[in-house]
Amino acid sequence: MSLIVRPAREADVPEMSRLLIASITELCAADHGGRPEQLAAWTANKDEAGVRAMIDNAALCLLVAELDGRLAAVGAVVPANGEVALNYVDPGRRFRGVSKALLAALESELQGHGVIEAQLTSTMTARAFYHAAGWTDDDDRVACQGGSGYRMTKCL
């Protein structure tokens, strides 16, 4: 098994879009509840144009994880505010250490920008994953992706 994390590039856009939409649709069902309007709002900026805009956004640092040469996860940080903005895994590539490796790389990216305490908003689905990675709940649920999420922090 070969796992690498690297910066996202323009050629990745179609596969990143597919992966983001599949991950949200399939893995975050407990969060969107299968409600079409919530799913549409959450994935609205995950089409190819939206992903291209993310890559072009200088405020974001986008990373991808490849497992055996295929895109397996997409993540992003906003160094200016110490935020992990994205961390999505391909539904068919779960439980292989991909999200864990990507999260470690995202945290390292923030550290490289001088961030001491990172923040993120977790879905209900990913909350236990972040707890296992040392993240702690910051407060109660907050509005997120047309639903609600959990603010979390971690000292890096």
Image (tube, helix red, strand yellow):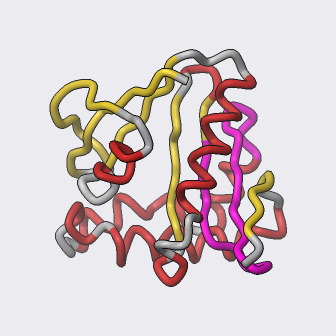
On the rendered image, what quadrant is the C terminus found in?
top right
Displayed quadrant of residue 100: bottom right
> In the drawing, does residue 47 fall left or right of residue 65?
left
| In the rendered image, the vertical position of residue 154 relative to residue 50, given as above or below | above
**Over which residues does the magenta segment extend?**
56-76
> In the drawing, does residue 109 fall left or right of residue 24?
right
- Residue at left offset 79%, top offset 78%: 69
Closer to the camera, 42 or 22? 22
Q: Which residue lies most toward the bottom here?
A: 92
Closer to the camera, 119 or 131? 131
Q: Position of residue 19 (x, y in %)?
A: 56, 73
| In the rendered image, the vertical position of residue 41 relative to residue 34, given as above or below | above
- Residue at left offset 61%, top offset 44%: 104
Q: Position of residue 124 (x, y in %)?
A: 24, 53
Q: Position of residue 134 (x, y in %)?
A: 41, 36
Tell me, yes or no, whether the highlighted magenta stretch contains residue 67: yes
Displayed quadrant of residue 76: top right
- Residue at left offset 75%, top offset 80%: 68
